[in-house]
Amino acid sequence: MDDDARPGPRRVLVTGGASGLGAALAERFAARGDRVLVTDLAPDATVPAGAVYQRLDITSPEDWAAALDRVRTDLGGLDVLVNNAGIAAGGRIDRLGADHWRRVLDVNVLGAVTGCRTFVPLFKEQGAGRIVNVASAAGLVHPPAMTSYDAGKAAVVALSESLRWELAPWGIGVSVVCPSFFRTNLAASLGGDDPMMETVATRLIEGSKLGAEQIAERVVRAVDAGRFLVLPDRNARIAYWTKRLARPLYDRQMLRMGARIHGAEQQDGVSA
């Protein structure tokens, strides 16, 4: 257990907490008696019993400042910041324009960065706290035709590791969560930039045997244990360790995926 462990109920802020994994995490924290501030883009949302809600656009420094004020005033501090909000993305590199890249990186990377920048001073004042950044297995293994999502989630992993060492002297812990595909509404945030690849991603999300509730339960246990790298499902663990310990096999798998994309393009009459 890390030094940031706190007896009794914790004070928790969850971004993207109105649906999907964020809602499941908020439910899990609240169910055990933690004091939870749920945030999301909607003006209002249904939250678990005992939790409260505040609108927060993670790309807005002003909204983050308002969330900090709410935490100081109503909660008297914060124990766990969960940077969960994000959008799905996918597509072949020649199908993704500059606006797509800006949107993905602004939300998936800078949203988490701004959350950390906002709350680290409070954590330093307290001499305790934990940042939980929700990335993806795509931040550790990098399949073809997911360049913007891979790059953004890899940046969140790197951000988390760097902060782990930077903030440890203040008693601040960091966890980074890297699940593979699980059933959630994340596919709804796909932007339509590459319909062929987005169809594949939607099928993988909807076809998973795991739901957000199961992932949330495992994440909360790992955070309680002070774990840095959280791989909450079997597919994520297999992908991670295959890349690390069986690189030739991993490379062959990635090449086969690229070949299937090439074949699909040829079938559609599009030059590879």
Image (cartoon, helix red, strand yellow):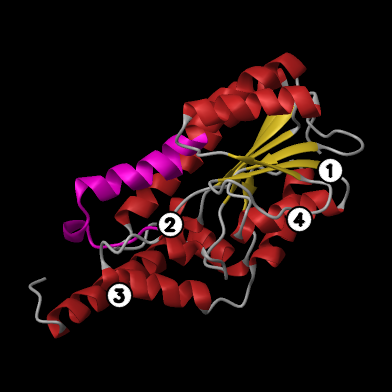
Q: Residue at x 56, y 67 (%)?
A: 184
The boundaries of the magenta stretch are 89-112
Identify residue for label 4: 27
**Disc on res. 141:** 2
Quarter of the picture holding the N terminus? top right
> Circle 4: is it few (<14), some (14-19), or many (20+) Cα within 10 Å?
many
Q: Residue furthest bottom?
A: 267
Asked if residue 91 lies left or right of residue 163, the reply is: left
Element class at badge 1: loop
| Residue 107: in magenta span | yes
Q: Is residue 233 visible?
A: yes
In the rendered image, residue 230, in percent from the top left (x then y), is placed at: 64, 51
Q: Quadrant of residue 218?
A: bottom right
Badge 3 marks a residue whose secondary structure is helix
Identify the residue under disc 3: 256
Q: Nearer the viewer, residue 257 or 266?
A: 266
Q: From this viewpoint, which residue is outermost toward the top?
A: 125
Specify which label sits upstream in the sequence, 4 or 2.
Answer: 4
Reading the chain from its start, which is encountered first: label 2 or label 1?
1
Residue indicated by mark 1: 34
